[in-house]
Image (spheres, rainbow, N blue to C red):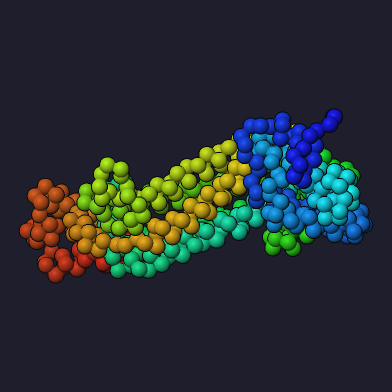
Amino acid sequence: MGEMRLPDDALYGASTQRAVLNFPISGRPLPDAFIQGLGLVKLACASANEELGKLSVEKSRILQQVAREVAEGKLNTHFPVDVFQTGSGTSTNMNVNEVIANRASQLCNRAIGSKEPLHPNDDVNLGQSSNDIIPTTLHVSVACSLDRRLRPALQHLQAAFAEKSRAFEPVIKIGRTHLMDATPLTLGQVFSGYAMQVTKAVERTERAVKALRELAVGGTAVGTGLNCHPKFAALVARKLSEETGLPFEEARNHFEAQGGRDDAVEVAGHLATIAASLSKIANDIRLLGSGPRAGFGEIRLPATQPGSSIMPGKVNPVMCEMLVQVCIYVQGLSNMVVACGRDGHFELNVTIPLIAYALHESVEVLANGARQFADACVMGLEADESRCRELVDRSLMLVTALNPLIGYDAAAAVAKEAFASGRTLKEVVLAKGLLDEAQVDTALDPRSMTEPGERGAGA
């Protein structure tokens, strides 16, 4: 295709430079985690080709050495191709092939571009096509990011909520359903719910990793495995499992593995669900902490920064706001992955770079957001016990505990009269002669309403 001028310090070649010139779109290359995953895939392919007798020991050793440098992020600056490129990711695959070949030349005191000792196509890409290697890298890199970045961050957040649940167990507060007063529960019970939501988020992360276990490697151009040893795919999957500690395997059907991106869409669904869960929690916490004098004010949020440029002393729930924005962003990215999965055609989905960007970006911001929310918000939360008690005492929904004793209709009449007259439930019950004082005190004890059993079984 003619001569191509390259930067003096570039390890990539003409194919990559053409892609740089062809796609000056966003200025955003594919995520580092994806490139590092591609390094791992090239390493496994080299090892498999050596074991199968397709690549000499000498070539395999230098190829694996350089591929590991890529996998460790040591060559990140040499991958400039924009995320908006050829939909198969061929430009990025060739970028990696050229960098590995030229770095091998550099290490072996050969001229960059000499294709000695490694040829970018014949050796680095041996038994491979962009059409199976880029989908493989998508699965490997996202699975590793989910396992190493998102799962630990969510576990950290879950531990913070579990600790607050234990600390807040003695604090009784009024419950709310439909944004209206409901029966009491403990603040610890509320936070145990948040802890369980995040526990389930961890489990969803683990299911997302499992959804990516099948690899397209071995299908080459259209899934038929042309120019590929029949044992290559299973061997590569095994080696990637050994490298990552994750259970990868050869795709059960290579035509599905290259033509469809349903596994990525499933992962996007898990991420969108996690985002919905974390957003709900963040919204609850900022409402519970609203005030300090004209809101609910049942908990106190850490003061992390001034909240207003004009109102002195104002402090806002900025960590909650941060996390809500992260979650909105992730749900948007997830919708984008769904569209990408839908818009694949025939034997190859050609939106893979965008899917890779969306999934890696989602994992990164969710992990960072969850960890920062735990550290800068959840761990510093305090209960305002007097405010919680005040709202419990003022609530009319304690009347629910009278249902078994005086019946639903009589209890409703008590609540309405108490609200209209400004009297307490106890005062109205005693005035009507419905129960004696000891019975009322026992029935309206808020602590007893928070405990398992018949008293707490109402909807």
Closer-to-camera residue (272/103): 103
Closer-to-camera residue (438/70): 70
- Residue 58 drawn at (x, y percent): 90, 59
Q: Is residue 256 visible?
A: no
Closer-to-camera residue (427/39): 39
Left or right: residue 44 compared with residue 191: right
- Residue 124 drawn at (x, y percent): 84, 49
Residue depicted at x 70% and y 39%:
81
Residue depicted at x 21% and y 62%:
386
- Residue 132 sits above or below residue 60 on the image: above
Q: Which residue sits furthest front?
A: 8
- Residue 37 sits above or below residue 223 on the image: below
Residue depicted at x 56% and y 55%:
150
- Residue 453 sits above or below residue 336 on the image: below
Left or right: residue 203 compared with residue 299: right
* Residue 335, quarter of picture: top right
Residue depicted at x 48% and y 57%:
371
Q: How many marks?
A: 0
- Residue 314 drawn at (x, y percent): 27, 48
